[in-house]
Structures are given as structure tokens and as C-alpha cells.
Image (tube, rainbow, N blue to C red):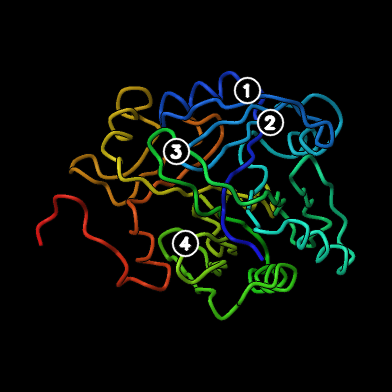
Amino acid sequence: MLTGVDRILVVSRDRRRAIAAWRRLLGAELVREDAVPALGANRSVLRVGSSEVEVLEMAGIGAVANHLARSRPGVFALGVTALDPKAVQRRLDALGIHHLVVGEQIFVHHDWLDVPGLHLVVSPAAEREPAGLLTHLYEVTHLCHDFTAAAARLARVFELESRHFVPIRSERYGYEGRLTLFDPDRLDRVETVTPFDPGRTMGRFFARRGPCLYMAYGESDRSAEIRGRLNEHAPRDWTGPAEGEAADNLFLHPRALDGVLIGVSRTSFAWTWSGRPERVRPAAGAAA
């Protein structure tokens, strides 16, 4: 039913500042602006790779204002695609799940979805001319109290094959969960996890905010260029290898991107922890 991840929605107190950061660090392009009264927001849409980032700024009462009342600027919702959005609507109706149709998009509040902390937007699948230094976005990390229940709920609502889900656990970052791959041959998924180490950054964040979206992940073949921009414009606001042609992983910290934490993995490298390590391709220029 779901074909991929194609966007994230982020909340900002100052859209112009957010747009400038995305353009400066990742080469994003502004493609359109409008208002979304259903969310109480003004919206600027950026193209980042073949994906989009919707920057939402509060314009009245609504879900965006509610988000800012309980949290800080950052990732607000995950955007996924469907070949047949009408079929998604019929599925939601059949399950009695309330939703809003906003233009061509379907918005599902986390309370309606019954997956605390996970707002979803479903858009029609579309081909786009890529822009900037990312290839595309493929993941958001969802923090919750019970990752097993969250993954099962997503599988049921959107008819995902749970046999394709991949268990994940990180002692380094202090969490355990599931990668809810929509397709076993693609990385697109929700990483729904439960932090277990309150002393780690993720654990402290979860203790303050509760169930929420924590970060997003994208792929790039141009990580050296991204690192160069980070060193020029935000030298203290990223982590990753300081040298080498193609970094396997980089992290852009929230201070760099107006509250949004973004991971960037070298193309195919995320299969290392996604159940298919044999699919990882050598970095360009690496010795055979």
C-alpha cells in the first residue's frame, strides 16, 4: 500500500531562517509556498534530492501550534507515498481512522492513527527532478514506549508485510526497535524504537518529550561536499569522519538545521544495519 518515504514536515518559528540553512548546507531548492489552514500553518516546500521538506510556520490555532506548545522546532511528520491514495483513504475509513484530505495529501494525526508521536502524511507517488546534495530521504526515527506495538499497528493499518521488518538494537545510542521496511528491496521505512539508556542523548530527549519523531535519514553520493559545507558554515554542529573521500555516515545537528537532526549515509551503506549487508556497495574510489 505504501511505496516509499518522500518527505518530512518540519516545524520552524522562522521559515526564512530554516530555508536558508537547508539551502546553505544541503543545496535544497525552494519549489513552492502556500498555506495549510488544516494545520494552522504557512508552508514552504523545499526539494532535497528527489524528496521534499515541508517547512511549516505557525499561522493560527492547529496541530503546528500544539506541537510548538509541547516541543521545540524540528521534525513534525513523516511523509510517505502510495500508488493509490484513494485506496489508503478506503483503508482508513474501513478501520474507522479519522483523517484530513488536504489537496492531494492525506494527513493522519498520531492520536487518530493510535501510534503516539507519529503524524503521517500520504502523498501520491511522483517522479521529481532531484536537487541539492542528497539523493533522497528514506527514514524517520520514531521514539515510543512500545516499539513492538507501534510496528504492529503500522503493519495492520497500511497492510505492510511484517516479515520484512528488521530488528535493530544499538548499545552505542541506547535503543531497540524495528525497521518497518515498506519493501524488502528498498530502505524506505519508519525506524520505530524504544530508548533504554536514559544517560544517552536519545534517552534524555525521550524523557523530556515522550513519544515523538526524533530525526530523519537520507542518502548521498556527495558526502565530501556536504562535509565541506558543514566545515564552512557549521563547523561545530556536525559529527562524522573528518577525512576521506566518501564518509559512510554524517550527522547534521539540530543547531545546523533549525532544530532538525539529519543523518546522511553513503548510498547503500544503510543496508549494513538494515538486514541486507551484502547489498552495501564499495565507496567510489575504494580499493577493490
Q: Earlier in the sequence, mark 2 or mark 4?
A: 2
Secondary element at tag 3: loop
- Placement of 126 over or under 17, stated as above or below: below
The residue lying toward the viewer, choosing from 9 and 198, is 9
The residue lying toward the viewer, choosing from 276 and 145, is 276
Residue at (45, 40) in percent of width and height: 49
Q: Residue 187: give x, y in percent of width and height.
A: 47, 61
Q: Amino acid at mark 2?
A: Leu
Q: Amino acid at mark 4?
A: Leu
Secondary element at tag 2: strand
Residue density around tag 3, few if under 14, some if 14–19, many if 20 or more, within 10 Å: some
Check the image and name the residue furthest to the top: 16
CA–CA distance between discs 4 and 3? 18 Å
Q: Which residue is mark 3?
A: 130
Q: Are marks 2 and 4 in contact (CB under 8 Å)?
A: no
Secondary element at tag 4: loop
Between tags 3 and 2, which lies in front? 3
Residue at (63, 54) in percent of width and height: 81
Marking on residue 187: 4
Q: Amino acid at mark 3?
A: Pro
Q: Amino acid at mark 1?
A: Arg
Q: Are marks 2 and 1 in contact (CB under 8 Å)?
A: yes
